[in-house]
C-alpha cells in the first residue's frame, strides 16, 4: 500500500470559515491517524473570485490552529502549463470538442441531483455555422463510475446524467476546476481525498479524467457540509463568519463535534494542542454522519 497522502484545497475567495474548517479538520485527522502526510493547495484558479490577501490569511489561520502541512503550498494560478499539457493529451485522445453555447443557451437543460445543469450535447457534433467556439468540453460517452465513499458509502454515477459533456477550458480561457484538481491531485501524489459532500457529484468527472490521463484514482470520503438556517452551504456569499482568534479551541471542538466525534465540551477551555492530542487519539471516520449536510452551530454562521 502507498503511504497515505491527503490534502486540503481551499479556494481563497475569503477567510477560513466554519465550513472550510470542517473540511480541513476531517482531512487532517484522517491523514494523521494513518501516519500520513497532509498537503495544502490554494485553488485560486478563478482569479476573478480570488480575494487579495485571502490565501495568506487562510494559511495564517491554519498555522494558528496548529495544522502542520508538508512542503510548499501548491498554487493553482502558477500551474497553467500543467493543465494545458493535460488538455492536449485529452485532445489527442479525440475526447475534446469546442462548444459555442452560452450559459443562457443551456439554462433550460435538465438538472442533476445537485441542481447542476447537464449539458444537452448541443455542440458535440460540431458548432452551428456562424457561431464561435467559447469553451472546450470533454465528450462523455457511456461512461460510468463507481466507488465506495469513505463516508457516504457506495456511489455509482452515469456521467451522461450527472454532467453530460463537461467543460475543461472555460469561455473566459481559464481551465476548469475538474481538470485542475485531477492534474494537481496526481502531481501531489494524493492517495486519499477527504472533502465536503458538495463535491460528491464532481468525483465521477474527476475519476473519468484520471482514467483517460492514466492517473491513479485516490480514495474518496465526502463529509457533510456546514449549512446555515436557510440550508445553504456556508460561503462568502452567505457572509460566513471568519474563524477568529480567541475562539480557536471553541471552533476546533465544534468542528470535531460536527463531524460526529465525541469531543468533550471541557476541551474548549484547552489549547489547540490539547484538542489535537484528543482528536488524534479518538478520530474515527466511521463516526462521521453519513449525510451530505448538517446545521452549523449558531455562533459560526
Ligand atoms: N477548492 C474547493 C473548495 O474550496 C475544494 C476542492 C477539492 O477539495 O477538491 O470548495
Image (spheres, rainbow, N blue to C red):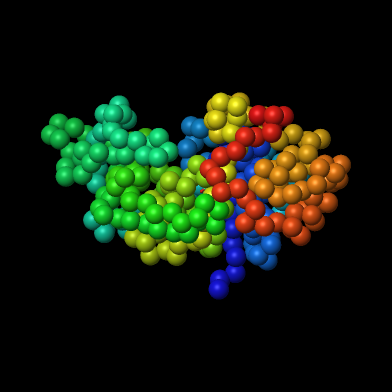
Q: Position of residue 100 (x, y in %)?
A: 24, 35
**Which quadrant of the figure has residue 72?**
bottom right
Extreme residue in the bottom direction: 1
Q: Is residue 229 above or below residue 211?
A: above
Q: Position of residue 165 (x, y in %)?
A: 29, 45
Residue at image coords 25%, 53% = 141
**Which quadrant of the figure has residue 230?**
top right
The tally of labels here is: 0
**Which quadrant of the figure has residue 239?**
top right
> Going by the image, does 203 lie left or right of 234?
left
> Going by the image, does 286 lie left or right of 156?
right
Q: Is residue 214 above or below residue 39?
A: below
Q: Nearer the viewer, residue 101 or 114?
A: 114
Answer whether residue 57 is visible to the viewer in this image.
yes
Residue at image coords 48%, 45% = 199
> Going by the image, does 67 lie left or right of 267?
left
Q: Nearer the viewer, residue 42 or 85?
A: 42
Residue at image coords 60%, 48% = 289
Instruction: Name the quadrant of the C terminus.
Output: top right
Answer whether residue 83 is visible to the viewer in this image.
no
Q: Nearer the viewer, residue 106 or 175?
A: 106
Q: Position of residue 6 (x, y in %)?
A: 59, 58
Residue at image coords 37%, 61% = 211
> Going by the image, does 165 lie left or right of 296?
left
Amino acid at each position: 500500500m502507498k503511504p497515505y497522502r491527503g490534502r486540503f484545497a481551499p479556494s481563497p475567495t475569503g477567510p477560513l470559515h466554519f465550513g472550510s474548517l470542517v473540511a480541513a479538520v476531517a482531512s487532517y485527522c484522517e491523514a494523521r491517524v494513518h501516519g500520513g502526510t497532509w498537503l495544502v493547495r490554494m485553488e485560486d484558479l478563478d482569479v476573478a473570485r480570488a480575494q487579495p490577501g485571502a490565501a495568506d490569511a487562510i494559511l495564517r489561520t491554519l498555522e494558528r490552529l496548529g495544522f502542520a502541512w508538508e512542503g510548499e503550498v501548491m498554487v493553482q494560478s502558477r500551474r497553467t502549463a500543467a493543465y494545458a499539457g493535460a488538455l492536449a493529451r485529452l485532445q489527442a485522445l479525440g475526447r475534446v470538442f469546442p462548444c459555442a453555447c452560452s450559459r443562457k443557451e443551456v439554462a433550460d437543460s435538465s438538472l442533476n441531483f445537485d441542481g447542476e445543469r447537464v449539458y444537452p450535447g448541443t455542440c458535440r457534433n460540431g458548432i452551428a455555422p456562424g457561431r464561435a467556439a467559447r469553451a472546450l468540453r470533454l465528450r462523455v460517452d457511456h461512461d460510468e463510475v463507481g466507488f465506495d465513499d469513505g463516508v457516504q458509502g457506495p456511489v455509482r454515477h452515469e456521467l451522461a446524467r450527472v454532467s453530460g459533456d463537461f467543460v475543461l477550458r472555460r469561455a473566459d480561457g481559464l481551465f476548469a476546476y475538474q481538470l485542475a484538481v485531477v492534474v494537481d491531485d496526481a502531481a501531489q501524489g494524493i492517495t486519499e481525498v477527504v472533502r465536503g459532500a458538495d463535491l460528491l457529484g464532481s468525483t465521477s468527472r474527476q475519476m473519468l479524467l484520471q482514467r483517460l490521463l492514466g492517473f491513479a484514482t485516490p480514495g474518496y470520503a465526502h463529509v457533510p457540509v456546514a449549512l446555515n438556517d436557510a440550508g445553504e452551504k456556508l460561503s462568502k456569499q452567505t457572509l460566513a463568519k471568519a474563524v477568529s482568534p480567541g475562539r480557536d479551541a471553541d471552533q476546533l471542538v465544534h468542528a470535531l463535534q460536527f463531524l460526529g466525534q465525541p469531543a468533550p465540551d471541557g476541551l474548549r477551555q484547552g489549547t489547540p494542542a490539547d484538542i489535537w492530542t484528543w482528536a488524534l487519539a479518538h478520530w474515527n471516520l466511521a463516526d462521521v454522519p453519513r449525510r451530505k449536510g448538517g446545521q452549523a452551530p449558531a455562533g459560526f454562521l
